[in-house]
Amino acid sequence: MNLREKYGINKNAVITIAGTVGVGKSTMTTALAEALQFKTSLERVNDNPYLDKFYKDFKRWSFHLQIYFLAERFKEQKRMFEYGGGFIQDRSIYEDTGIFAKMHFDKGTMSKVDYETYTSLFEAMVMTPYFPHPDLLIYLEGSLEDILERIKLRGREMEQETPIDYWQEMHSRYEEWINHFNACPILRLNIKDYDLQQENASIESILEQIANKLNTK
């Protein structure tokens, strides 16, 4: 009996991993997919034509970046469900509007017209009865200090050059966002409670929590 069967997790489930930059979404995505024998849906960073430009000039490129993410995530969400499920997804489509676009509008790095255009498009595409929402959203949370340390260890140049105020703002907005999120069930995991990079790390306690959430929807 494999781990998916042991914990009674539906082979067609779609589970999304959410959380701020550096919190370990990709590591969790890969570990869960391997344990459940699911496919992965990883965030494509290297192919993004706007990301480097965005980190150098938020105001000029924020709208372009958000539209790009919206289109890519919408296509990927559609693909996963058309395939029949059985996916672990790195980052949700909901974070784009609930956190990133709103943050740039509030801080003046996205104009009112651009923000209204973006949110209107998001609502028409995603907030409808026809859009397939995931079975579970796993929210990875941690203190700002722990997350900044992970960003430092990861060593991406464009992230190292980003002011700490930006990460502080994002951290607080994520906490606000998850407290009001209701598109699907949520499982909250603190990054201090597990270490999937340890050689003998076990993911079974996380699988048990996932099963409990999925089976009590």
Image (cartoon, rainbow, N blue to C red):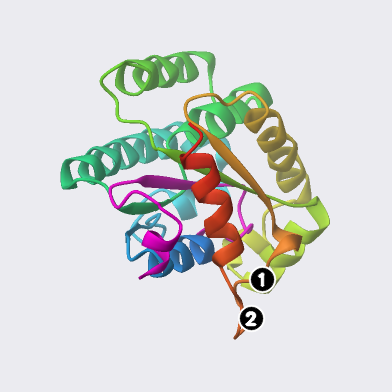
**Is 66 placed above or below 10 here?**
above
> Which type of secondary structure does the marked residue at label 2 adopt?
loop
Q: Where is residue 102, by image quadrant? A: top right
Q: Is residue 182 left or right of residue 67?
A: right
In the rendering, at what x and y percent does residue 149 appear?
Answer: 76, 65
Residue drawn at the location 82% of the way across and 57% of the way down: 145
**Is 188 placed above or below 118 here?**
below
Tag 1: amino acid = Asp
| Quarter of the picture holding the N terminus | bottom left
Residue drawn at the location 66% of the way across and 37% of the way down: 174
| Residue 67 belongs to the span the image colors magenta | no
Secondary structure mostly taken by the magenta-highlighted segment of the chain: loop
Residue drawn at the location 21% of the way across and 44% of the way down: 79
Residue drawn at the location 39% of the way across and 37% of the way down: 134
Give, as a single range, the part of the protein colored magenta: 1-25
In the rendering, at what x and y percent does residue 84 appear?
Answer: 20, 45
Q: Residue furthest left?
A: 82
| Residue 17 belongs to the span the image colors magenta | yes
Q: CA distance from mark 1 to mark 2?
A: 6 Å
Q: Badge 2 is on which residue?
A: 198
Q: Is residue 136 left or right of residue 83?
A: right
Q: Badge 1 is on which residue?
A: 195
Q: Residues within 10 Å of mark 2 (few under 14, many from 20)?
A: few
Nearer-the-camera pick, 99 or 116? 99
Q: Residue furthest bottom?
A: 199
Tag 2: amino acid = Gln
**Is 217 placed above or below 136 here?**
above
